Amino acid sequence: MCVFCKIVNKEIPSKTLYEDDKVIAILDLSQATFGHTLVIPKKHYENLFDIDESTYLHLMKVVKELALKIKTKLNADGINIINNNHQAAGQTVMHYHVHIVPRYTNDDFKIINIDHSKDYNLDEVLNKILK
C-alpha cells in the first residue's frame, strides 16, 4: 500500500485541510513554500492517465477552491498548480496528486523554462501529435 493510501486510511497522520468522500487535501511535509498543499483522490490511481473523469473533475474543482483560499489566507502573490506523471516527469509517489504551491515574491522555489525553439520544428511536432 502506498503512502497516500495509508494517509487516506488514517494509518499515517497528516495535516488535513479538506476532506470529502472522493478527495483529501493535506499539507505537504516538504513545504516547498509556505502552505504547499497536496490534493489526493481517496481511490488509488497511479497518474493522470488512470484517473476516471468524474474523480478528476471533482479533484480539480477542489484544487481551484483551495488555491483561492490559500492565496487569500496566506497572502500569496501567486500559485503554481503542479502535477507530475511518471518518474521521468518527477512523480515520486505513484498515486495521482496535485500540488498547490503558493508563491511569494522572492521565494526560492524555481521552475526553470528552457527555450528550445531553435531545436524543434513545430510543424513536425504538430504533425506527429495529430497523426
Image (tube, rainbow, N blue to C red):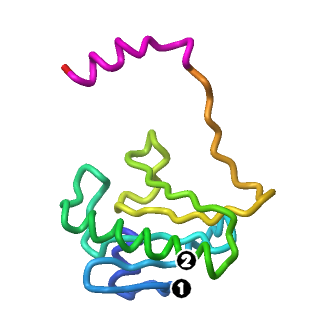
Q: Give the image quarter of residue 69.
A: bottom right
What span is colored magenta in the figure?
117-130
Q: Give the image quarter of residue 58.
A: bottom left
Disc 1 packing (10 Å; few <14; some 14–19; many ≥20)? few
| Residue for point 61% across, 35% down | 113
Label disc, if present, on residue 77 of the rendered structure: none
Quarter holding the C terminus is top left
Q: Indicate whether 114 appears above or below 124.
A: below
Residue 30 seen from this side? yes
| In this picture, residue 28 sits left or right of residue 65 | right
| In this picture, residue 90 sits left or right of residue 71 | left
Task: Tell me the residue that label 2 is attached to.
Answer: 27
Residue 26: x and y in percent read: 49, 78
Tag 2: amino acid: Leu
Residue 130: x and y in percent read: 22, 23
Q: Residue furthest right?
A: 106
Residue 37: x and y in percent read: 53, 72
| In this picture, residue 36 sits left or right of residue 106 | left
Residue 1 seen from this side? no
Quarter holding the N terminus is bottom left
Tag 1: amino acid: Lys
Q: Circle 2 — which element?
A: strand
1 in the magenta segment: no
Q: Circle 1 — which element?
A: loop
Q: Indicate whether 51 appears above or below 7.
A: above
| Residue for point 69% across, 75% down | 75
Tell me whether the residue at label 2 lies in contact with that at label 1, contact meaning CB atoms closer than 8 angstroms: yes
Q: Marks 2 and 1, how far apart in space?
A: 6 Å
Q: Nearer the viewer, residue 38 or 12?
A: 38
Task: Tell me the residue that label 1 is attached to.
Answer: 15
